[in-house]
Image: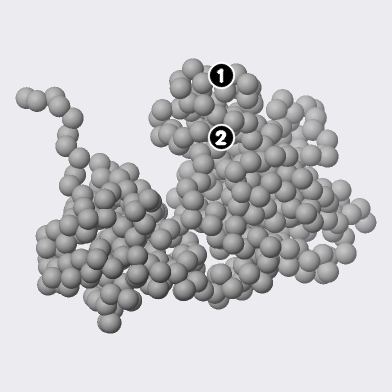
Amino acid sequence: MSDSPQASPPLWRQLQLTAAALASIRAGVSGSVAFEAVEPGLRPGVQALGFQVLRWLGRAEALRRQLAKRTPPPAADALLCTALALAWDGERSPYEPFTLVDQAVEAAKRNPGTRAQASFVNACLRRFLRERDELVSITDREPVAQWNHPRWWIERLKRQHPRDWQRVLAADNNQAPMTLRVNLRKTSVAAFRQGLAAAQLPSVPVAASGLQLARARPVSQIPGFAEGECSVQDAAAQVAAPLLLSGLELRRDAPLRVLDACAAPGGKTAHLLEAAGSAAIEVTALEVDPVRARRIDETLARLGLGAKVVVADASRPADWWDGQAFDAILLDAPCTASGIVRRHPDVRWLRRESDIEQLALQQAMLLAGLWPLVRPGGRLLYCTCSVFFEEGAHQIEAFLAHNTDARLLPSPGHLLPQSGMNARGVPDNALGDHDGFFYALLEKLPR
């Protein structure tokens, strides 16, 4: 029996699976679910191709409109756009454009669902190879092709971030870095960084206890991960726990009561416990989804931490609250995820403009429901991974207008992807390369 490594799957097969994932996403399935459906051995390669397709889908669809007068059937269109997204820019293409075209046609021939359109796919892609420069130049005039975001998204960013909208859109189309949060209960940033360096994993310090890797690696290759010495968490997300706990009295003899209101998968819950150090802290982690709640338990178990995990709806305190006020509440509210498009490139194509208003109503309801649970002198940290004002600055402005017992403490406000600071907030301690977030730290005034 040969013990040689298994041959890589042919490119045509990877293109088939990538196109199938794209078709699912177009039908409303999240990217994580679509790629999870791919068999494990093929998943990493297909997801890498799929992410690139999603980052350049606006360009691909514009090119397809130039090549075909009518939209082809969904499966054929997904395969055609997959090939165009991967091949349109030779410098970014993972394979030679000619190879991609050849293998895309082979993928069409080998799939019963696209076999009838194989000649059509071949004709479109061969024409694309002949006229690529001219076709790309024509599509340069279309904003959706140029920026690879829906038109409504582009226009909203233009209005709300007139100085930064182009930089935000460009950042969304880049691969996000892999950033670790060091578990200070088990090691120090300096010591952990030395361990990474010894394993040929160079890194740079970010945030208060973070390290950004020069190149992403599977967590199985990160020394100390399995032992709970670190977690994967973006630098902007690492702001939450230290910001909420800053200014509160941490003591060993009097536990601080903290609520993480929308806690799954448990990264911020764990960070709260780590940031408290040797001080006494009791953290309740709420999650409405039982499946996602189990991920909180898994996260805490790996890190050697403990919290009370409760499956409940944060907006309905009567169902789970014991009546004892909290010293601090972390509300990482459900949102459009418009700030983490670098990590989830499907988000831009799944969201609708109407989602913003619906999510803003849910956020307001959560704020209104949780604020009475904060003790006088206590704090609530509201955050979203969104760049839209409706889910950030405007939400907090409305809350303050209706709650005279609330005071806004110095907070970062809107952190834009790769932005180092917000001119209207406070410096964010050299976070480096990070996702988009919004933070507002609210203090309840004594009666």
Q: Is residue 444 visible?
A: yes
Position of 398 relative to 284 (above/below): below
User: Where's residue 440, x and y in %?
Assistant: 75, 54
Residue at 41% from the left image edge and 28% from the top image edge: 221
Q: Is residue 284 left or right of residue 394?
A: left
Farthest residue in the right direction?
447
User: Where's residue 411, x and y in %?
Assistant: 78, 50
Q: Earlier in the sequence, mark 1 or mark 2?
A: 1
Q: Is residue 258 left or right of residue 64?
A: right
Q: Is residue 375 visible?
A: no
Residue at 24% from the left image edge and 66% from the top image edge: 130
Residue occupied by mark 2: 212
Number of on-image labels? 2
Give the residue type at disc 2.
Gln
Q: Is residue 433 left or right of residue 97?
A: right
Position of 390 relative to 256 (above/below): below
Residue 213, labelled with which disc? none
Q: Quadrant of the C terminus?
A: bottom right
- Name the one closer to the observer, 189 or 97: 97
Residue at 34% from the left image edge and 60% from the top image edge: 88
Position of 280 relative to 195 (above/below): below
- Name the one closer to the observer, 89 or 82: 89
Farthest residue in the bottom direction?
69
User: Hey, which quadrant is residue 84 in on the image?
Assistant: bottom left
User: Where's residue 141, x and y in %?
Assistant: 47, 73
Residue occupied by mark 1: 194
Q: Tell me if label 1 and label 2 are in contact, CB under 8 Å.
A: no
Residue at 55% from the left image edge and 37% from the top image edge: 179
User: Where's residue 291, x and y in %?
Assistant: 45, 50
Label 1: element kind: helix
Label 2: element kind: strand
